[in-house]
Amino acid sequence: MSSSAVKAGGTGELPVPSAGTPRKSVMGTKLWVAVLFLLPALLLLGSLVVYPIGYSVWRSLYNADGSGFVGLDNYIDIFTTDSTLTAVRNTAIWVAVAPALVTVLGLIFAVLTERVRWGTAFKLIVFMPMAISMLAAGIIFRLVYEQDPEQGVANAIVTSVHDAFVDSSVYPKARPNAQASDLKASGGGSFTSTGTVQAGSPALLPLVGIAPNKLPGSPEDARAATGEGITGTVWLDFKLGGGGEKGKVDAGEKALEGVRVEAVKDGEVVASATSGADGTFTLPEAADGAQLRLPGSNFSAPYNGIDWLGPTLVTPAIIGSYVWMWAGFAMVLIAAGLAGVDRNLLEAARVDGANEWQVFRKVTVPLLAPVLIVVLVTLMINVMKIFDLIYIIAPQPSQDDANVLALQLFQSSFGGGGNYGVGSAIGVILLLLVLPMMYVNLRRLRKERQR
């Protein structure tokens, strides 16, 4: 028995402080001292967290200018107005898709970097986008998704791949000279002559619609076809400064090289040729008596890539930029969890005959489940607040199609809407949506501490 217990009466019980003794905490600190030290933090917490939440809840029950009580009308408006319904739908897409994609990519990167020689350098490259602000990332991807292939990297790649397999049109704006040619539109962008071609009578196929100084490359002067065979000339029946005779190859008029000419009999192509550098072409004898057709492939508009920021693809495109930014965050956290996995378990699975995919799916992933859940929930909370990327990347015509709740909150309150009631109601809904995810994270942390 300790001496203090003996002084208390030999019963072994600790002495009970008298009514006049100041209360102390477990650490022996006086209560008022602890409160004094906590007071600044409590004041900050109250002014920056508690008060804004309480005021938002109160303000959401009033109309736009706060002059009249409307009850739950603002909340009803959120789920009945088209713009806010779009925001709710897009937010649900973000929560369902973006965190899952980032987590899966982070898991793949974390596992693969353990098996490559330059794993550290790879991790650094993947994590680097995290050092960029949302604003800067938005500007970068606004340029990446630019429609013009000359400016947008995404469409530059897409058009390069497309043009490698599909021939592009050389003269997309060209058309027959209606005053001097018998070529008539025949469907699908093609033009077919009303008459037929005969051997020894060169065909003349004049085209207009392009300025001579806008022709690709360095075109040669056109030359009238000659000879006894089935020949002809395709040229630009116009020259700068005017002059010349319509339907005739005049000096200084430019040849149209690479134009495909087809000989058609009874609706079937019996022969074809391509115009040369001087605009002339020669068809085989089978074309004698056939009509000449210039297929629409000669005049189709060039392929300009994908409309990434149009109404259909704007949300997936912005999610792609988010994945680019946050994949490094998920990779680092998952890699930290992977470093703590017992390697003996993995080796035991391999000894038992499991292949690498089975080891990954049935051993590695279950062991990393706590880390994966934390990463997934954290990212779900993060995408609830997504605002910068959408505001910067989405152009004005398609911004309504990419709208989310956080952006709608800004637009309703400060972006010209001036309806602080609806804006506050959206803020309260976002808080209610985030609370379950926060609870899951806190519960997970408590379980980890108990271990």
Image: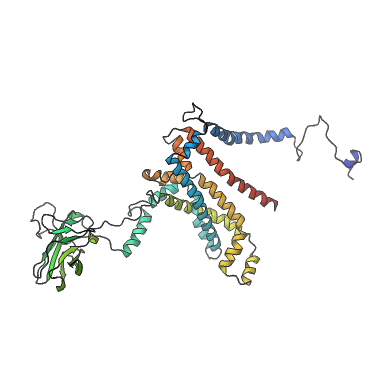
x and y percent of residue 187 in the render?
A: 22, 58
Residues 176 and 324: in front is 176
Residue 354 occupies which quadrant of the picture?
bottom right
Residue 419 occupies which quadrant of the picture?
top left
- Callout count: 0
Answer whether residue 324 is visible to the viewer in this image.
yes
- The residue at the point 41 percent across, 50 percent down is 141
Residues 214 and 228: in front is 228
Is residue 361 positioned above or below 420 on the image?
A: below
Answer whether residue 409 is visible to the viewer in this image.
no
Left/right of residue 329 with respect to residue 30 in the rendered view: left
Left/right of residue 434 with respect to residue 259 in the rendered view: right
x and y percent of residue 310 in the render?
A: 37, 49
x and y percent of residue 1 in the render?
A: 90, 45
Outermost residue on the bottom side: it is 285
**Display coloring:** rainbow
x and y percent of residue 32 in the render?
A: 72, 32
- The residue at the point 62 percent across, 66 percent down is 346
Left/right of residue 6 with respect to residue 84 in the rendered view: right
Outermost residue on the front side: it is 266
Residues 90 and 264: in front is 264
